[in-house]
Image (cartoon, rainbow, N blue to C red):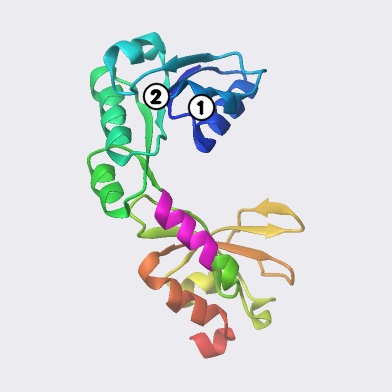
Amino acid sequence: MHVVIMGCGRVGSSLASELEAAGHSVAIIDLSREAFRRLGADFKGRTITGVGFDRDTLREAGIEMAHAFAAVSNGDNSNILAARVARETYGIQNVVARIYDPGRAEIYQRLGIPTVATVLWTSDQIMRRLLPQGSQSEWRDASGKVQLCEMHVDGSWFGSPVSLIEEITPARVAFITRLGEGLIPTEHTVLQDGDLIHVIVRDSEIALVENALAHSPEEAS
């Protein structure tokens, strides 16, 4: 499929290279011609110098035949404007905008523009590496209210059914990593030593779940 990207910084250039390597056609837009140096000599896609929400620029990038559009420049306003033009003017369904301001990200998400709130994600990743106990965020929705987390569990949970986590805490077990492989648990799955537990949980309830899993099931009940 054809993908148009606005912004040839580190994120945009990485996306362009990965998409092209996966066999997709790519056009990337940036205000600075120098930015395209990040793509390397092997990049075969289109490079367009211009404003990413300008219709002539978008048409030159092939927006009319595009299947997806990513706005990942360093400006929140430019990203959301370009994303809205791509969706509302050209009917692109697969649209995403990178937004630095978490407050704005939530608003635009409600307007139907999928967003990635960079500040929320980055600060969370840094905190989890500074304070590795408890949980490590692996994904969060654009509003920052729901997360997929890898949770640390006390050894006393091993030998208990996975369903006990959902009985005792407000978390939902999404999957388990066991011996390096993902496993979707059933009601009969029993936790084993070495399992990594990945749960879906509300942001406001992470501390509660962390505390429960840091103690034995009996203490957490």
For residue 6, side relative to residue 78 (left or right): right
Instruction: Determine crowd level at label 1: few under 14, some 14-19, many 20+ residues with C-alpha closer than 10 A.
Output: some
| CB under 8 Å between discs 2 and 1 | yes
Q: Residue at x 30, y 11 (%)?
A: 56
For residue 52, side relative to residue 84 (left or right): right
| Residue 131, placed above or below residue 19 | below
The image shows residue 213 at horizontal and vertical percentages of: 55, 78
Whether residue 37 is visible, yes or no, is yes
| Residue 180, placed above or below residue 165 | above
The image shows residue 172 at horizontal and vertical percentages of: 47, 63
Q: Residue at x 59, y 75 (%)?
A: 133
Q: Which residue is mark 2?
A: 31
Q: Quadrant of residue 6?
A: top left
Q: Quadrant of residue 153?
A: bottom right
Q: Quadrant of residue 18?
A: top right
The image shows residue 157 at horizontal and vertical percentages of: 64, 78
The amino acid on which the numbered mark 2 sits, given as a three-letter code, is Leu
Near-viewer residue (205 or 21) = 21
Instruction: Determine crowd level at label 2: few under 14, some 14-19, many 20+ residues with C-alpha closer than 10 A.
Output: some
Mainly helix, strand or loop, the magenta region? helix
The image shows residue 117 at horizontal and vertical percentages of: 38, 49
Q: Which residue is mark 1?
A: 35
Whether residue 169 is visible, yes or no, is no
Tell me the element at label 2: loop
Which segment did they paint magenta?
118-127
Q: Residue at x 60, y 13 (%)?
A: 44
